[in-house]
Amino acid sequence: MYIKDLQIKKYSNVDVQYALENALGKLFTKIYGYSEDHKHSNINLILGYTASIIAGAASLYSYLKPFNECKGILAVSVVLYFILGGLMTIYNKFVKKNEVFNGSKKEEKDV
């Protein structure tokens, strides 16, 4: 049914994983009636965007001010960027683990 939507490049493990995760998501949501919980992706997005905003703000500040004035801010932003990236990696490895789909199914009430 959804097989025609799968497009995988030869010898690309990342494409295979992505395609399978999408296919399983469609299977559980459209066929079995589950609703997907986006908690893990939301946490990854928050950590990633926060790290990017910090890096972008530090870059903009260093563009506007001389380098000697902003060395401290740049050092702090680099440390924060690596901490947030590390937190994202730790979260994916120990909390999300190998989870492909996270959702719940609403129980139908007897009428």
Image: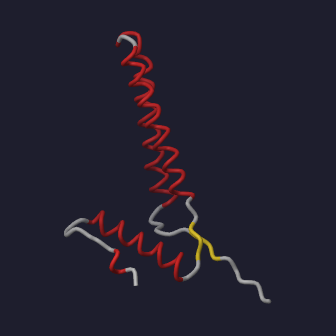
Residue 23's x, y, as percent?
Answer: 41, 74
The single residue placed furthest to the bottom in the displayed view is 111
Residue 9 spot, x, y in % from top left:
22, 68
Give the vertical position of 80 relative to 1 (above or below). Answer: above
Residue at image location 32% in from the left, 74% down from the top? 6
43 to the left or right of 13: right
Q: Quadrant of the C terminus?
A: bottom right
The front one of 73 and 106 is 106
The quadrant holding residue 2 is: bottom left
Q: Where in the figure is residue 7, as x and y percent of width and height?
A: 29, 71
In the picture, residue 64 is in which quadrant? top left
Between 16 and 60, the one nearer to me in the picture: 60
Can you say whether 23 is above or below 80 in the image? below
> What residue lies at 71% left-to-right and 83% top-to-bottom?
108
Residue at image point 56% right, 68% down:
36
Q: Residue furthest left?
A: 10
Left of 46 or right of it: where is 55?
A: left
- Extreme residue toward the right, this view: 111
Q: Quadrant of the N terminus?
A: bottom left
Q: Residue at x 49, y 48 (%)?
A: 45
* Location of residue 39 in the rendering, given as x and y in whole percent from the top left corner: 57, 58
Q: Name the image colouring.
A: secondary structure
Residue 82 or residue 36, whichever sits in front:
36
Q: How many marks?
A: 0
Q: Is residue 16 left or right of residue 29?
A: left
